[in-house]
């Protein structure tokens, strides 16, 4: 990232023109109509009534409706990472030269949904809340001090935030007059959420969560009269809802999307942009069998990525078969010279040789035995209903049988899986990484010691508990070094460690996409108009709903 891209960014309110869309007219029975609600669905199974935006397992976070009620200081499009953030609740900001401090000036025309004015004190309170509350600092930002001076707040950091600028500016703001009165914000379910967003919570049931317009929204009149959320049991149920029209917006795995979904109606649309983020098989490097690097290397050598791509993902996501785990072409410019053009091929005999050299043997039934004399077994886990992940895991289980490993696939609930992965209570799981302007997020999410937690303690990333002091230091140095050549040298070595130690097994380039219907509402992000990430669980949600127009 070149320093000039974001350094000392101070964008005035005059440079920001929020697209406002009014509601006019009514449509016929075949489509359109400004009075039709918008239904958003996700295949996330049963939900509990919890609207705490800081808790990953809350319904608000799981289904994404956090971003209807709470808004970030700035909007940034990770599918176009070179672009500068766009002012949102902040009207301007300025970083110091070494990115250890940022001064933010919030908008002065924003009110909370209960009628109170949003102030600079709310912004300062939010940063302090994130800094001081265990579990709220999901991005592990090195916050130091938060001070208010006039109409601006200055946040300082213990280290350079060169690579974390968009994460800091992506912080959503909560009202001090509500959250300061909570006994324990980390456990409060926030039943009556108060935010700045274009919609407010109307009703909550297990079946439907309904939102109505915030009539005092600073960005203008919200165009959709009602937004509803439904959590479907699995991918198939979500697809059925999209095809029937009972849901009009989602992000769900759809096999053979053209035939299964797009061809069924002219108003069925999909937009699947990608960034520098991947799906990877996270391996628990602290527990058997993947505490042995030989076992990790062997698994990496026998998993058939092409089969996972074509059968598990049904071609829905891009194949990642580079040895570095970087998606192509997005990651090509960052790839070390020694790895350019190199892909991971299936090599069962080579995997057996690696295991033999490490002291593994096979019994009379060709079952793999570890150096301590124990049969090697693997339990894969991912949530029930996530059919693409589960089909992919079954392929991997079959692949591991080629070297004598008994592997099974378990399907916990989303909540149970989230907790197990965070606490390190798993052997292997498919999970995504963040995306960013460089591959730093991919490698940091997988193997950064700054995110290392003991097993049993919740981790935000490095779920596999990979521990390597050298790569931790390289990641830290990369994040604060402005010199491009030095940074590439660090990235080269980071990739070497990744290839040699196999902390995770890359699988796919994850789209930050969505399926949606234009039968009733238009104005969603698309290939022709890629103004935001289209996924309805992302911070861009409030931007998108304000850009919608009733179909004609």
Image (tube, helix red, strand yellow):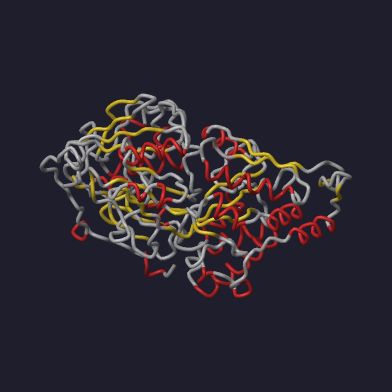
* Depth check, front residue: 281 or 82: 281
Image position of 426 with respect to 472: above or below: above
Give the total number of marks visible in the rendering: 0
- The reply, left or right, for residue 547 in relation to residue 513 is left
* Depth check, front residue: 549 or 145: 549
Q: Residue at x 54, y 44 (%)?
A: 460
Tell me where residue 203 appears, x and y as whole percent: 30, 25
Q: Residue at x 47, y 48 (%)?
A: 255
Q: Residue at x 27, y 28 (%)?
A: 202
Quadrant of residue 71 within the rendered picture? top left
- The reply, left or right, for residue 282 in relation to residue 483 is right
Tell me where residue 56 appears, x and y as whole percent: 47, 38
Tell me where residue 199 appears, x and y as whole percent: 25, 37
Q: Residue at x 57, y 57 (%)?
A: 443
Quadrant of residue 217 within the rendered picture? top left
Tell me where residue 288 appears, x and y as whole percent: 75, 43
């Amino acid at each position: 990232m070149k320093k000039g891209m974001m350094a000392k960014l101070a964008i005035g309110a005059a440079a920001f023109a929020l697209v406002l869309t009014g509601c006019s007219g009514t449509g016929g029975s075949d489509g359109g109509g400004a009075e039709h609600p918008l239904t958003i669905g996700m295949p996330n199974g049963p939900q509990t009534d919890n609207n705490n935006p800081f808790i990953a397992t809350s319904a608000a976070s799981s289904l994404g409706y956090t971003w209807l009620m709470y808004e970030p200081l700035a909007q940034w499009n990770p599918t176009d990472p070179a672009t500068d953030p766009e002012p949102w609740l902040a009207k301007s900001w300025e970083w110091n030269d070494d990115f250890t401090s940022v001064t933010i000036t919030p908008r002065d025309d924003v009110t909370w949904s209960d009628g109170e004015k949003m102030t600079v004190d709310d912004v300062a309170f939010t940063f302090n809340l994130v800094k001081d509350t265990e579990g709220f600092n999901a991005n592990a930002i090195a916050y130091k001090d938060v001070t208010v001076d006039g109409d601006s707040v200055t946040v300082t950091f213990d280290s350079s935030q060169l690579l974390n600028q968009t994460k800091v500016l992506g912080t959503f703001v909560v009202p001090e007059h509500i959250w300061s009165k909570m006994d324990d914000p980390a456990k409060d379910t926030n039943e009556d959420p108060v935010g700045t967003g274009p919609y407010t919570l109307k009703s909550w049931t297990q079946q439907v969560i309904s939102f109505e317009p915030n009539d005092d929204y600073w960005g203008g009149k919200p165009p959709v009269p009602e937004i509803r959320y439904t959590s479907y049991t699995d991918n198939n149920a979500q697809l059925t809802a999209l095809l029937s029209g009972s849901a009009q917006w989602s992000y769900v795995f759809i096999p053979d999307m053209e035939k299964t979904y797009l061809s069924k109606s002219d108003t069925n649309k999909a937009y699947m942009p990608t960034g520098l983020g991947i799906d990877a098989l996270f391996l628990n490097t602290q527990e058997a069998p993947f505490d042995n690097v030989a076992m990790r290397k062997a698994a990496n050598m026998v998993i058939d990525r092409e089969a996972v791509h074509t059968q598990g993902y049904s071609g829905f996501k891009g194949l990642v078969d580079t040895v570095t785990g970087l998606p192509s072409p997005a990651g090509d410019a960052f790839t070390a010279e020694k790895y350019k053009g190199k892909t991971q091929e299936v090599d069962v005999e080579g995997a057996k040789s690696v295991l033999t050299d490490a002291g593994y043997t096979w019994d009379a039934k060709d079952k793999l035995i570890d150096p301590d004399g124990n049969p090697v077994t693997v339990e894969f886990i991912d949530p029930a209903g996530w059919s693409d992940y589960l089909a992919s895991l079954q392929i991997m289980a079959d692949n591991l049988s080629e070297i004598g490993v008994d592997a099974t696939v378990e399907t916990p609930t989303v909540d149970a899986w989230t907790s197990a992965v965070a606490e390190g209570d798993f052997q292997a799981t498919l999970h995504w990484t963040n995306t960013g302007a460089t591959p730093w997020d991919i490698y940091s999410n997988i193997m950064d010691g700054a995110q290392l937690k003991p097993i049993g303690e919740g981790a935000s990333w490095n779920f596999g508990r990979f521990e390597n002091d050298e790569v931790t230091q390289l990641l830290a140095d990369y994040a604060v070094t402005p010199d491009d050549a030095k940074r590439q040298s660090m990235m080269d070595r980071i990739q070497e460690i990744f290839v040699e130690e196999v902390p995770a097994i890359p699988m796919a380039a994850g789209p930050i996409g969505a399926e949606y219907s234009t039968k009733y509402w238009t104005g969603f992000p698309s290939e022709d108009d890629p103004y935001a990430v289209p996924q309805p669980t992302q911070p861009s949600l409030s931007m998108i709903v304000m850009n919608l127009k009733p179909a004609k």
